[in-house]
Image (spheres, rainbow, N blue to C red):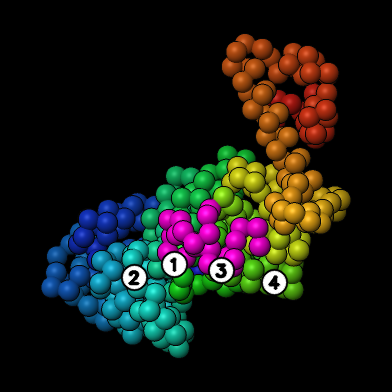
Amino acid sequence: MSIFIDKGTTVLVQGITGRDGSFHAAQMRDYGTRVAGGVTPGKGGMEVHGIPVFDSMEEAVAATGADTSVIYVPPAFAVDAIYEAVDAGVKLVVCITEGIPANDMTRVVPHVKAAGARLIGPNCPGLITPGASKVGIMPGSIVLEGGVGVVSRSGTLTYEAIRALTLEGMGQSTCVGIGGDPVIGTSFVDCLEAFENDPATVAVVMIGEIGGGDEEEAAEFIRDRMTKPVVAFIAGRTAPPGKRMGHAGAIITGGCGTAEGKIAALHAAGVSVAGSPTELPELVRCALEGRAGVPAPPAPAPAAAHGGARREAAPAVSAARNRLSLRRWLSSMTEYGMPAETFLESAGGSSERFGCPMMSRSNQGDEQ
């Protein structure tokens, strides 16, 4: 199982004759996605990488039976492309395009929902179900089949988190980039609910950033509705108020949308928040051990009087950092010709002094 896409997903590429559409159509097909056709008005009858091109979505859906569309068209035409896809009967629309006016999105999102369809994006990397299908621009080389769901507002941070999980042997069920614009079609809560109902997902990684209140809404949902463990990372802790940081939605206004506020809300919901994406795998491991009967990490300490959520890291985060530090030390010592066992002996004969009791001398070879 997975969420939103699987091996049976059939995709149409809107804007397939453009540079981005052509490139990513081939990438999706090579990954194993069922790319049934593309749409560019006036280009019907031609082929791109052997994929047939149609003049309209209505014609393409009738000919292929596709249920999903991915949009690679300029901002001036993207809203019309969304309308056309939904009106043709497509049930999942993934809009990669960046730069669509928020005012336009406030009109198209209700139209999509009224049609019983789902929009992911805009300004998003799409989504991927490892080993089954990818729709969008996420690299297939970094994913691994497994049970960790990933949902993110950021594109590149999504890739970093996925890669960190994969390197630790933690595969993913589905990875979703919901987009960084102020008005998007699918929220954190939508994805969390889908992961909660997905039998293949055992834990969720959520990557948020400054701006808006989506993370706070997600924290409330996690507190009230989620039974599966969730860990998080919030980008933008050092962002100055009033300055947009990368995404149109990443801006702190009037004291709202701060990283501190989001982290505090997540902590209050019982979510461990990582200091960097590389710490996420260890937090996932701790969370799963807690749910499996092993004592869960202690709850975060209350916020300090001055500093709010800029508090000392929760014990689980501290432990994760210590484990990562120990792994890096062992790796560097090995590179310089010092066996890991020798280094441990020089450090006192035990990894416990590093806050990493699970890494005993008997299993240090597995942990390097």
Residue 148, position in %: x, y? 62, 55
Q: How crowded is mark 4: few (under 14 residues within 10 Å), some or many (20 or more)?
A: some
Label 2 belongs to which residue? Answer: 100
Give the extent of the magenta segment: 239-261
- Given residues 307 and 73, the one toward you in this image is 307
In the image, which disc is placed on residue 220? Answer: 4
Tell me the amino acid under the disc marked 4.
Glu
Quarter that holds the N terminus: bottom right
- The residue indicated by pointer 1 is 181
Are the residues at dot 4 and dot 1 in contact (C-beta closer than 8 Å)?
no
Kind of residue sitting beneath label 1: Asp
Question: Is residue 119 in sight in this rendering?
Answer: yes
Is residue 23 positioned above or below 200 on the image?
A: above
Q: Do the residues labelled 2 and 1 touch (CB within 8 Å)?
A: yes
Cα gap from disc 2 to disc 4, whole angstroms: 29 Å
Q: Closer to the N terminus: mark 2 or mark 1?
A: 2
